[in-house]
Amino acid sequence: MSSAPMGTAAIRARGSHCGMIVALTDTDGTTHEQTISLRDEPGGQSFEVTGSDVVVLRLTTESAHGARDDTRLAIAEVELFGRR
């Protein structure tokens, strides 16, 4: 998740939780969901989600630090890796 520069982020109201649901759907149509908690700090964040024969990945934000009705949330980059 991308965030505002630290100077700007420090002056905004901050929520207590920022969460995202990661849903993986495999070839037989079964969907597995995992809730991820994200840190309220600038920079990249890594987390591991595992699945087999995944054909659909859905990211759904539950909440965001400092979110308001007149702003939009942006996810700057998602990097996926194959089997390890």
Image (tube, helix red, strand yellow):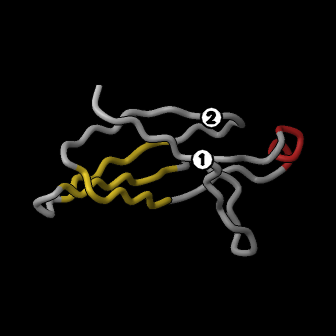
Tell me the crowding category of disc 1: few under 14, some 14 to 19, or many 20 or more residues within 10 angstroms, Cα based: few
- Callout in the foreground (2, 1): 1
Q: Amino acid at mark 2?
A: Gly
Label 1, on which residue? 77
The answer to whether residue 49 is left or right of residue 32 is right
Q: Earlier in the sequence, mark 2 or mark 1?
A: 2
Circle 2 residues within 10 Å: few <14, some 14–19, many ≥20: few
Q: Quadrant of the C terminus?
A: top left
In the image: residue 66, left or right of residue 50: right
Residue at screen point 19% across, 55% down: 26
Say left or right for 54 vs 18. Answer: left
Residue 73, image quadrant: bottom right
Which residue sits furthest bottom? 70
Q: Residue furthest left?
A: 28
Q: Position of residue 32 (x, y in %)?
A: 22, 52
| Residue 60 position in % (x across, y down) | 45, 61
Query: How far apart in space, not on screen, are marks 2 and 1 (Cα)?
Result: 9 Å
| Element type at mark 2 | loop
Q: Residue at x 43, y 41 (%)?
A: 80
* 9 with respect to 1 (left or right): right
Discs 2, 1 touching: Cβ within 8 Å: yes
Q: Residue at x 76, y 53 (%)?
A: 13
Please state which amino acid type lies under the numbered disc 1: Glu
Q: How many marks?
A: 2
Camera-nearest residue between 63 and 28:
28
**Who is closer to the viewer here, 81 or 73?**
81
**Horizontal and vertical percent position of residue 69:** 69, 74
Q: Which residue is mark 2?
A: 44
> Which type of secondary structure does the marked residue at label 1 adopt?
loop
